[in-house]
Image (cartoon, helix red, strand yellow):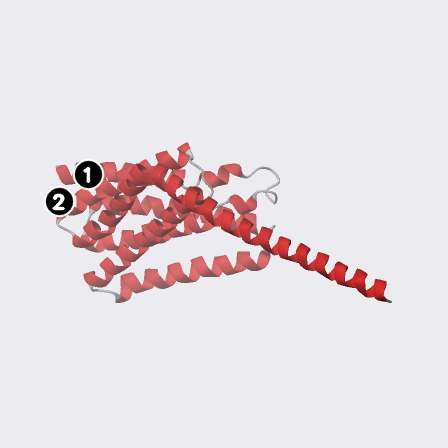
Amino acid sequence: MLKKIAGCIGFILSLLYYIISTYSFLKLKSDCSKNFQYVKFYKILFNYTASFFSYFYSDVTNYGEMIYCNRIAIFLNLAFLIIYILLEIRQDLFDCILNILLIGITSLTFYHYFYEILVDVFIYGLYFILANLLVLIYFLYENYTEIKIKLDSSLTFYFNIIFTLTSFFWLIYGVLYKDNYIKISFGIEFFFGIFLILGKKYLLKIIGESSEGFNDIINDDLNNNQKKDMDNTIEFEEKKTKKYENI
């Protein structure tokens, strides 16, 4: 019973996380050329990869809630990838073709590999962990970018909470099933999620102060170099004046 409860809550939170991840598409207007760069293609791509690999792992281990969750997530993320590619045709045809090949070839190759070749649960588990680490790395990158520019966004804060809660319930799910791959993957995500929720304001202060100190050093160096240039110019002009006086 507890397994199903944890799995159902993880299922709902995961889909909510994937849906919110596509919010950058809402910034697109009729003239998408002006704000097309704001669409987070790699975030959707990593979510697709994670749901793709997680589906095959949950299928081989027969985790029902995780199977349904990732099956829906695959089609959801794939739909937004297709939308991105269709929009990209107007921007850069070459990149559009590359993205089609990237998504199409890798998806079909792994689909064949997982269904027809791979039989080792250990390898399935490694793919599962690595795919979820991709999502975690991009999640940390987004937070680092905001911290670096001193942006404390409420949307990111709530997004971090959803990410952390999702990791927590899947971690509980893994503990109840005694699955080490789920425990390792979501245990790492839960740790970093808690770390960011509790320590983001402190990180904003620390990184902000270090950035200011670094900028002060750069500005001092620039000012010193400009002063030297001015001194050299004055000295050169003085010598030049004396030279012409002697003439």
The answer to whether mark 1 and mark 2 are in CB contact below 8 A is yes
Q: Amino acid at mark 1?
A: Ala
Q: Is residue 97 left or right of residue 6?
A: right
Residue drawn 13% across the image and 47% down it: 177
Across and down, in percent, residue 140 comes to 36, 48
Q: Would residue 216 be visible to someone looking at this image?
A: yes
Q: Position of residue 165 (x, y in %)?
A: 26, 38
Q: Tell whether 220 sits left or right of 117.
A: right
Residue 105, quarter of the rendered image: bottom left
Residue at 43% from the left image edge and 41% from the top image edge:
22
Judging depth in this view, the residue of 98 and 225 nearest the camera is: 225
Q: Quadrant of the N terminus?
A: top left
Which comes before the other along the chain, label 1 or label 2? 1
> In the rendering, which numbered label is found on residue 176?
2
Q: Which secondary structure, mark 1?
A: helix
Residue 52 seen by the camera: no
Q: Is residue 24 above or below residue 236?
A: above
Q: Looking at the picture, which amino acid does disc 2 mark? A: Leu
Determine which of the numbered discs, if any, sits on residue 6 in the image: 1
Alpha carbons under labels 1 and 2: distance apart: 9 Å
Question: In the shown orientation, is residue 190 left or right of residue 145?
Answer: left
Quarter of the picture containing the C terminus is: bottom right
Q: Residue at x 28, y 52 (%)?
A: 54
Q: Position of residue 47 (x, y in %)?
A: 37, 49
